[in-house]
Image (tube, rainbow, N blue to C red):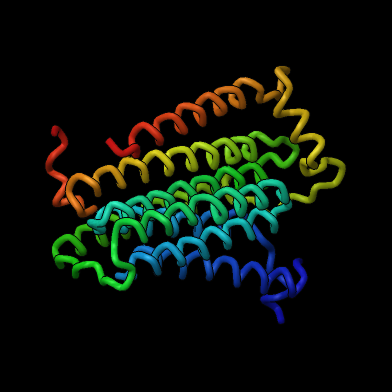
C-alpha cells in the first residue's frame, strides 16, 4: 500500500513510453523492406514526437497551449505526408509490381 | 497521491503503448502491423485525454484512426496479398537495427533521467485552465500574440498542394 500512497505521476512516466515508441519506429525503419511497413514505422516516430510536445506542455507550462497547437499542426502535416507517400507507393507498385525497396531501383523511366 | 483508478489507467496505457508499438514493427504480416499501429495510436489518444486535452484526443482519433489507418489498410489491400508473410530478416540487418534502436534508447533515457529539471510532477492547475474549445477556436483564428492564424493558413495551402499532388502522382497515365 505504501507504493500506492506515494505514487505520483511525473513527466518521466510519459516520456519513457514515448521514447520507447520512437525507438521501435527507428528499429522498424531500419529493418523493414516493405515500403508501407516503413511508412508505418515513420508514423510511430511522428506520434511519439507529438506525445512529447503535449507532455512537455502539460508538465512544464500548463497555462499555455503552444505544445498543443504544435501537435495539432503536426497531426495535420502527418496526414498530408501519408496521403502523398501512399500515392507514390501505389504509383511505384504500378511500375514494378512490388513495393519492396530492393526492387525499386528504377527511378527514371 | 493519485486515485487507484488513475494509477491502473496509467499502467494500462503505458503498457499498451509499448507492447503495441513493438508488435507493430516486429509482426511479419503487414495487415496486422497496421492494426497494431491503430492500437498504439488509440493509446496515445488516451494519454491526451488523461492529461486533459480532450480536443487533441478527438483530433488524434479522427485523423489518425479514422483517416490514416484506413488509408494504410486500403493501400495494403491494393498492393499485397494480406495473408503473405514478409520475408525473414537477415540476421545482420536485424542486429544493426536492434543495436541502433537500443543504443538510442539508452542514451536518450539516460540523458532524460539525469536532467532533473525535466522531471516534474503533474502540476496542480489551480487558477489556470486547460484550453477549452472556445479558447482553441479563438487562438487558431487570431493574429495576435498567441494567435496561430499564419500556420493555420499555411496548413490549408499545404493540404491543397497535397490533394493536387496525390491526384497527379496516383493518376493512371
Where in the figure is residue A13, as x and y percent of width and height? 57, 60
- Give residue B162's quadrant in the image: top left
Where in the figure is residue A74, as x and y percent of width and height? 53, 38
Where in the figure is residue A11, as x and y percent of width and height? 60, 53
The residue sitting at the front extreme is: B173
Q: In the picture shown, does residue A4 fall above or below B106?
A: below
Left or right: residue B20 versus residue B86 is right
Q: Is residue B103 visible?
A: no
Instruction: Pick the residue in front: B107 or B31.
Output: B31
Q: Is residue A65 visible?
A: yes
Quadrant housing the N terminus of chain B: bottom right
Q: In the picture shown, does residue B136 fall above or below A43?
A: above
Where in the figure is residue B127, as x and y percent of width and height? 87, 42
The residue sitting at the top extreme is: B144
| Picture residue at 53% right of the left edge, 70% below the top | B15
The residue sitting at the right extreme is: B127
Instruction: Pick the residue in front: A9 or A94.
Output: A94
| Picture residue at 78% right of the left edge, 29% below the top | B138
| Picture residue at 50% right of the left edge, 61% below the top | B38
| Picture residue at 51% right of the left edge, 31% below the top | B159
Quadrant housing the C terminus of chain B: top left
Left or right: residue B70 versus residue A65 is left
Question: What is the tally of numbered marks visible in this picture?
Answer: 0
Amino acid at each position: 500500500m505504501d507504493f500506492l500512497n506515494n505514487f505520483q505521476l511525473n513527466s518521466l512516466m510519459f516520456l519513457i513510453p514515448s521514447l520507447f515508441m520512437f525507438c521501435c519506429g527507428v528499429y522498424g525503419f531500419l529493418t523493414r523492406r516493405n515500403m508501407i511497413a516503413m511508412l508505418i514505422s515513420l508514423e510511430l516516430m511522428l506520434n511519439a514526437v507529438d506525445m512529447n510536445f503535449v507532455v512537455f506542455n502539460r508538465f512544464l507550462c500548463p497555462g499555455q497551449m503552444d505544445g498543443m497547437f504544435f501537435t495539432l499542426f503536426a497531426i495535420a502535416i502527418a496526414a498530408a505526408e501519408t496521403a502523398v507517400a501512399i500515392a507514390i507507393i501505389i504509383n511505384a507498385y504500378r511500375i514494378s509490381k512490388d513495393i519492396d525497396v530492393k526492387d525499386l531501383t528504377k527511378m527514371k523511366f | 497521491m493519485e486515485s487507484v483508478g488513475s494509477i491502473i489507467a496509467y499502467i494500462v496505457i503505458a503498457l499498451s503503448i509499448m507492447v503495441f508499438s513493438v508488435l507493430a514493427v516486429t509482426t511479419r504480416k503487414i495487415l496486422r502491423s497496421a492494426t497494431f499501429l491503430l492500437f498504439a495510436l488509440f493509446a496515445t489518444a488516451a494519454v491526451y485525454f488523461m492529461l486533459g486535452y480532450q480536443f487533441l484526443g478527438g483530433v488524434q482519433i479522427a485523423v489518425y484512426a479514422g483517416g490514416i489507418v484506413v488509408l494504410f489498410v486500403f493501400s495494403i489491400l491494393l498492393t499485397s496479398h494480406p495473408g503473405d508473410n514478409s520475408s525473414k530478416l537477415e540476421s545482420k540487418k536485424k542486429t544493426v537495427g536492434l543495436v541502433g534502436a537500443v543504443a538510442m534508447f539508452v542514451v536518450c533515457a539516460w540523458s532524460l533521467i539525469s536532467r532533473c529539471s525535466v522531471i516534474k510532477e503533474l502540476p496542480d492547475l489551480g487558477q489556470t485552465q486547460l484550453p477549452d474549445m472556445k479558447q482553441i477556436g479563438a487562438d487558431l483564428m487570431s493574429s495576435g500574440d498567441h494567435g496561430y492564424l499564419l500556420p493555420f493558413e499555411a496548413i490549408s495551402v499545404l493540404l491543397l498542394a497535397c490533394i493536387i499532388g496525390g491526384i497527379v502522382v496516383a493518376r493512371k497515365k
